[in-house]
Amino acid sequence: MTARRKASNWSADVTEHSDALDLEPEVFRSSDPHRVALSLKQSAEHSHRRKASPFRSAMSMLTFYINRAGKNLPEGRKRVLEDAKDELRKVFGKAENGA
C-alpha cells in the first residue's frame, strides 16, 4: 500500500472505528441536520470510551469529518453538516455565543 493510499484511508478508518464513539452507519450522509445531531448525541451519551464530555465528543467527531472531507465535500453536504453543529448545540442545551 502506498503512503498516499494509507493517508487517504486513515480518516475513514477513524470515522468508522472511533475509539470514542460508535457511530450510526452513514450518519454523515443524512440530509437532515437535526437527525445528524440527534444521532451524534445518542452515540456520545452511550459511549463508555470517550474522554471528553458527550457534547465535546460529538462536536469533535462532526468537525473532524467536515475537516477531513475538505474540498471534496460538496457545498450542499457541507451546509447540512455545518447546520448540524448548530443543531448539536440545541439538542445538548448549549447557548450560542451572543444568545
Image (tube, rainbow, N blue to C red):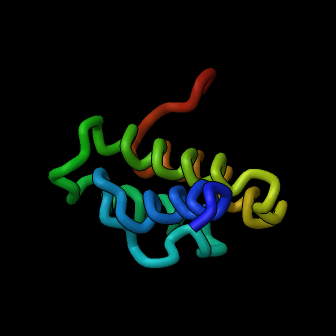
Q: Position of residue 95 (x, y in %)?
A: 49, 32
18 vs 78, left or right, is left
Task: Name the outermost residue toward the top.
Answer: 98
Residue 92 falls in which quadrant of the image? top left
Position of residue 5 in the picture relative to residue 87 (left or right): right
Residue 16 sits in which quadrant? bottom left
Report the number of discs.
0
Query: Residue sitting at 21 percent across and 59 percent down?
Result: 46
Return the x and y of residue 82 as percentages of the image width and height: 67, 50
Furthest-bottom residue in this view? 25
Q: Position of residue 8 (x, y in %)?
A: 63, 60
The residue at 39%/38% (across/down) is 56
Q: Nearer the viewer, residue 94 or 21?
A: 21
Up-down relation of residue 92 to residue 7 (above or below): above
The residue positioned 60% from the left and 54% from the top of the image is 7
The x, y position of residue 27, in whole percent, is 50, 71
For the C terminus, which image quadrant? top right
Q: Residue at x 74, y 51 (%)?
A: 70
Q: Is residue 43 left or right of residue 4?
A: left
Q: Residue furthest left?
A: 48
**54 relative to 69, above or below:** above
